[in-house]
Amino acid sequence: MQNIRIADVTLKEAQTVPGMTLSFKEKLEIAKQIDKLGAAVIELPPVANEVSDAILIKSMASGLKNCVLAVPCALSVEGIETVWAALKEAKSPRLQLIVPTSTVQMEFLCRKKAPAMLAMIAELTAKAKALCADVEFIAQDATRSEREFLYQAVAAAIDAGATVVTLSDDAGLMTPQEFLQFFEELKAAVPAAENVVLGVQCSDECNMGCACAVAAACAGVREIKTAVSCDGAVDMGAFAQYLRKRGEDLGLSTGVDFTRMTRGIKQVAWIVNTERSKTSPFDNGVGDYDNDFVLSDDDSITRVISAVKSLGYDLSDDDYANVYSEFKRISIKKNVTAKDLDAIVASAALQVPATYVIESYVINSGNIIKPTANITLRKNGEKLTGLSSGDGPIDAAFLAIEQVTGRHFELDNFQIQAVTEGREAMGSTLVRLRSGGKLYSGNGISTDIIGASIRAYVNAVNKIVFEEG
C-alpha cells in the first residue's frame, strides 16, 4: 500500500482569487485546521512583504504540529535567503523553487533561453539545499513544456539536491490516461526520479483535476496538491473521499483523518468564503483565545515570556520586564489566564506618549436607526473629526477613528468584560490591532462600554504610530 501525501495549497491559491482577503488570524486558523486533518504539507504564498510575511511564517511555524511548512522563494539567491530567515525555525521547513519550463513562460517570466534556465535551476537548487534539507522543485506549466527540456530541468534539479519534484498542469487539458502516460515517460527518461518524491499539481479548469490526480498517483506520484474551496484546484475533500472508497483497490492510502475531515473542511470553507462587510472594521470573527494556559506566582520570567509570545506578541526586553513585574503583582492574588495576560500586556507594554487624544465622541444608536459615530481626536493641538455609520455603535466608532487616522488596521481581537458589579459597573475592553504583521494591544476602562472601546482602540493606535515613527 503506497501512502499519498496531501500538500494543501489553500492559502497559496486564495491570494489569486479576486476580492478575497484573509486576515492574519484567519490564515493561522486555516493552517491549524489543515494540520489537524492530517495533510502532510501546508504551502504559503510567496513573500510579498518581508516584515509582515516573516511574522506570519514564524507564527505559523510555531503552531504547526505535524505538517511540513513550504514557502516559495523568489528566483534569486537573495530571495532564497529572505524566505529561509523566516522559515528556519519551523519544525519541518521546505523551500520551494517554482520555475517556468514552457518556452513561452521561460522567455516571458525569466527572459532566459533553455541553457541559461538549466544553469539557473542548478545554481538556485544547490543554494536552497545548502540551507534546507527539504527542497521542492516545481516545474510550472510542465505539461506544455518541450519534453526534452523538461527532462533536463528535472534531472538538473535532482542532481543539485531537490528532494521533491512537482510537475504542474496549469492548462488542465490532459485526460487521466494522458497524465498516466506523461509520468511514465518522465520516469523512463529521468532514472534519477526514482530517488525523489514526485508530486503533481493538477488544474481543475475542465473538472478533470481529481481524476488526473488519481491517474498520477497510479503512475507513482506520491504528493498531490489539493485545496479547500478554491476554484481551479483539486478539491481536498473529493480527492480524499475517492481514495477512501477506492484506495485499497488501487493500492493507495492517505494520512487524512476522515473522522475530522468533513467538519474541518467545512470550517476552512466557511473562513475562505465568508463575505467581508464593507462597512465594518471587523475583518473576521474576533474574541477567541486558542491558548488555555494558566500561570501562577511560581512561574519564571522565561515561562511568562513564552506565554506572551504564544499570544502573538513580539516585545522588547524592557517591555517583557514590565509585563513580568505587573504579572508578579497580580499573580500573588490569583492565577493568570491567557485573557488576563493579554490585559497585562496592553497595560504594561509599550507605554508611549499619546499622538491622538480623545477630545469628544457622540454615538447615535437605536433599533430603528443606523448607528453613527462622530469622534473628534486631537493631534499636535489640531482637532480632527471622523463621522461614520456602521453595523453597530462600536463598528461606527472604530470606522470614525479610521477616518481620522487615514488608515485601516486589522482588528485581531476585541474583548469586553465587567470589572466591578452593580448598576454603575465599570467595563474593561481590550483591542488588539495588527500593523505590518505585528500585534499591538490597547485597553480602556469606563462605565460607558462604548467609551471604553474607543479608549482601547485609540490606545492601540498610539502604540502603532509611535513605533512606526
Image: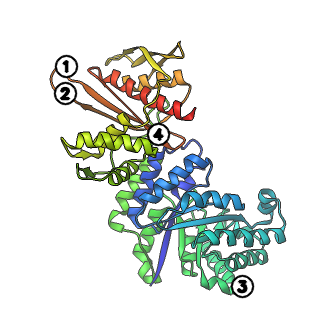
Could you give the CA–CA distance between mark 1 and mark 3, rounded to whole angstroms? Answer: 80 Å
Percent position of residue 344, x then y? 32, 38
Q: Is residue 193 above or below residue 413?
A: below
Q: Is residue 41 left or right of residue 262?
A: right
Percent position of residue 222, x then y? 53, 77
Q: In which quadrant is the N terminus drawn?
A: bottom left
Q: Which residue is mark 4?
A: 275
Could you give the CA–CA distance between mark 4 and mark 2, rounded to whole angstroms? Answer: 37 Å
Mark closest to the chain's N terminus, 1 or 3: 3
Residue 420's disc number: 2
Mark 2 neighbour class, 10 Å CA radius: few under 14, some 14 to 19, many 20 or more: few
Which mark is nearer the camera, 3 or 2?
2
Mark 4 neighbour class, 10 Å CA radius: few under 14, some 14 to 19, many 20 or more: few
Q: Which residue is mark 1?
A: 424
User: Do the residues bearing badges 4 and 3 touch, measured as CB atoms within 8 Å?
Assistant: no
Mark 1 neighbour class, 10 Å CA radius: few under 14, some 14 to 19, many 20 or more: few
Q: Is residue 250 above or below residue 421?
A: below
Q: Which residue is mark 3?
A: 189
Amino acid bearing label 2: Thr
